[in-house]
Image (cartoon, grey):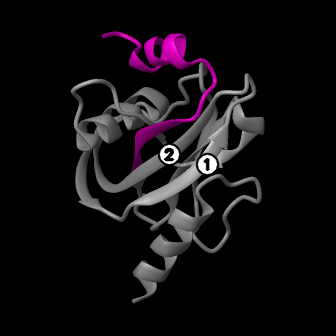
Amino acid sequence: MDNYIQWIRSKVGTAPLILTAAAGIIFNERKEVLLIHRIEKKGQWALPAGYLELYETPQQAAEREVFEETGLIVKVHELLGVYTMKDTYDNGDEVWIVGLPFICKPLSGELKADEKEVSEVRYFSLSHLPKNLRDRDILSDLKRRTLI
């Protein structure tokens, strides 16, 4: 099914849904983390991420989303943890997101924004993250983990 979430929305309208999302955490050689600047969501900075498609594993979703949003081909290495958050879209759709951020190893590709969902891709130091940041709890945990 091509757009599973749209199909569900056609049945339930804007009622709350529980959705699973996967994110990719990618570091460069300077140990900076890659973030995307979302066109929607008030221009928030975030990890490259998106919802799982029907019959897709979380690892496949993370690798797909990273490629779609940044142009990088990555391989999932390790799950950082499980996170939850409530979100409401501009159109009133409500979701409870179960987020699975994966640390990924970059393999190849050319870093570029997809321009449909993402206006910019940039690496940031974990100690100098942007203010308008969506995934602050994940990145705080990641920062603590890298200090241990």
The magenta-colored residue range is: 1-24
Residue at image position (56%, 72%) is 140
Numbered label attached to residue 133? none
Judge whether 11 appears above or below 95 on screen. above
Instruction: Look at label 1 and name its amino acid.
Output: Lys
Residue 85 left/right relative to 2: right
Question: Which residue occupies the extreme bottom position in the image?
Answer: 148
Q: Which residue is mark 2?
A: 97
Pick the residue in front: 1 or 60: 1
Residue at image position (28%, 24%) is 54
Residue 75 left/right relative to 89: left
As for residue 20 lying within the magenta part, the answer is yes
> Could you classify mark 1 by the number of other residues whose Cα lies within 10 Å: few (under 14), some (14-19), or many (20 or more)?
few
For the N terminus, give its image quadrant.
top left
Q: Which residue is mark 1?
A: 86
In terms of image quadrants, where is residue 61? top left
In terms of image quadrants, where is residue 4? top left
Residue 24: x %, y % from top left: 39, 48
